[in-house]
Image (spheres, grey):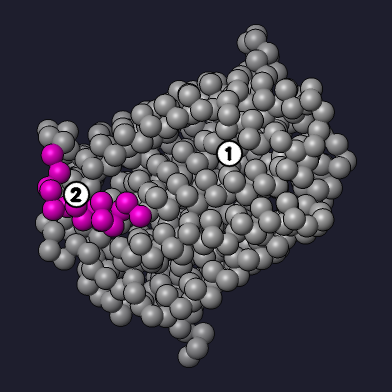
Amino acid sequence: MILKKFIGDRNFYRTVFAIAVPIMIQNGITNFVALLDNIMVGQLGTEQMSGTAVANQLFFVFNLCVFGLLAGPGIFGAQFFGKGSNEGVRNVFRFKILIGVLALAAGIAILSFFGDGLINSYLTGEGQEGDRDLIFKSGKEYLTIMLVGLIPFTATQIYASTLRETNCTIPPMFAGLAAVLVNLALDWALIFGKLGLPRMGVKGAALATVIARFVECTIVIVYTHAKRDKNIFISGAFRSMKVPRDLVLKIIVSGLPLAVNEFFWSSGMAKLNQCYSQKGLEVVAATNISSTILNLFNVVYIALGSAVGIIVGQILGSGDMKRAKETDTKLIAFSIAAGALTGCVMAALSGAFPMLYDTTEQVRGLASRFIIILAFFVPVQAFMNAAYFTLRSGGQTYVTLIFDSVFMWVVSVPTAALLVKFTSFDITAVFFICQAVDIIKVGIGLFLLKKGVWLRNIVSEEK
């Protein structure tokens, strides 16, 4: 009887896999190509790899800000779809376009004017001056070209997120697959100068990514408009960009904390890595290697978190609170189990994976230890991710702000800064402790879930 509370039937898992697997495949392929991209850049040298890693930390902040800005409207999109309101989904889509354009303009402006200083903030650790200069040069070259890629990235997220909220997950997956194949082929050709193309090094890696993003964006947009009979929300979506005022206010009230949360959480992660980098330039390379394999494996629990937000959000929109709670419990249990399994596989590869990089034994050894630590805490991260999406599905975005980014800046970042500055602990011990403090969040998450603060229908009066 107890197991029945945490384990669903065949139809339950069929529904979960229908939503989560395409997202897993798309994100998995994307991260696998990012892994190969990372390895290929690593063949150019440790400094070039570190430079692109620093630049990607900055793009990581922008990407999550876009996700956060679209997540607020997305809560309403999923619940409108559960309610059967196509006009509601259409209005949410329009709002996403407006907020996406603002985010794009701000992101390009900030990275254009302050990019140099942000890159340099990661280069304060011990190391040779020549190494530091080469890392900065590589990061600057990569960032300059990648700025163009923010345009198709933002457009893709606007369209693809709306498709997923309406249970259309396969087309974005195929668009992502096409993009990563293009990215992989162009990486090889442009980084190393194959097929008669110039050897561009780091610049080639950036150019390949930008072209691939335009490919993905084109496929997603063309599909959405070509299948108007299935994607009903797109019919008449551009006749007007007007969004009902009441809906705008509700989205802002619920969605603003998500945008703020993603910014502060992602910037907090960037700050954590900046703290780690003060232990030496080799730490920049090691954290890049360990985070690359983590990104490849965490697609499982991240996709399941997205499934939580979509499935539970749609049930909440239908008004069935009892089924929403039962479904959420099973989804969280499944996420934790999947996290434990992927963590074991990740730990098993901790010694072999760093050997793929053309770098020093010191960096490889450090990266291997980081990977083991990250693998150990994957089940913890899986629970927190599922809890976050549960709270978000019911519009409890202020709670998620405290749960996520406030915790990051009040606990995680100060812990790292204090350990780096005032203790003689080596970087491995610092890294472990900073991961371990997240266990506190598990207790907070369990309390909030049990209390049921997320069991809310936020579209009951909307059309």
| Quadrant of the image occupied by residue 197 | top right
Measured along the vertical axis of the image, is residue 68 above or below residue 12? above
- Badge 1: residue crowd in 10 Å (few <14, some 14–19, many ≥20): many
- The amino acid type of the residue labelled 2 equals Val
Q: What x and y, as percent, mark residue 214?
A: 43, 26
Read off the magenta span.
242-257
- Badge 2: residue crowd in 10 Å (few <14, some 14–19, many ≥20): some
Residue at 25%, 37% (x, y): give it: 98
Measured along the vertical axis of the image, is residue 314 above or below residue 100? below
- Residue under pointer 2: 248
Residue 197 sits inside the magenta stretch: no
Where residue 26 is drawn, which disc sits there? none
**Is residue 136 left or right of 218 when viewed as pictured?**
right
Q: Nearer the viewer, residue 138 or 216?
A: 138
Residue at 30%, 63% (x, y): give it: 395
Residue at 51%, 47% (x, y): give it: 266
| Quadrant of the image occupied by residue 119 | top right
Q: What x and y, as percent, mark residue 253?
A: 26, 56
User: Where is the C terminus found, in terms of image quarters?
Assistant: bottom left
- The amino acid type of the residue labelled 1 equals Gln
Measure the C-alpha gap from mark 1 to mark 2: 31 Å
Q: Nearer the viewer, residue 249 or 204?
A: 249
Q: Nearer the viewer, residue 305 or 67?
A: 67
Residue 180 visible in the current orientation: yes
Residue at the extreme bottom of the image, as rendered: 1
Q: Secondary structure at mark 2?
A: helix
- Residue under pointer 1: 57
**Is residue 292 left or right of 88 when viewed as pictured?**
right
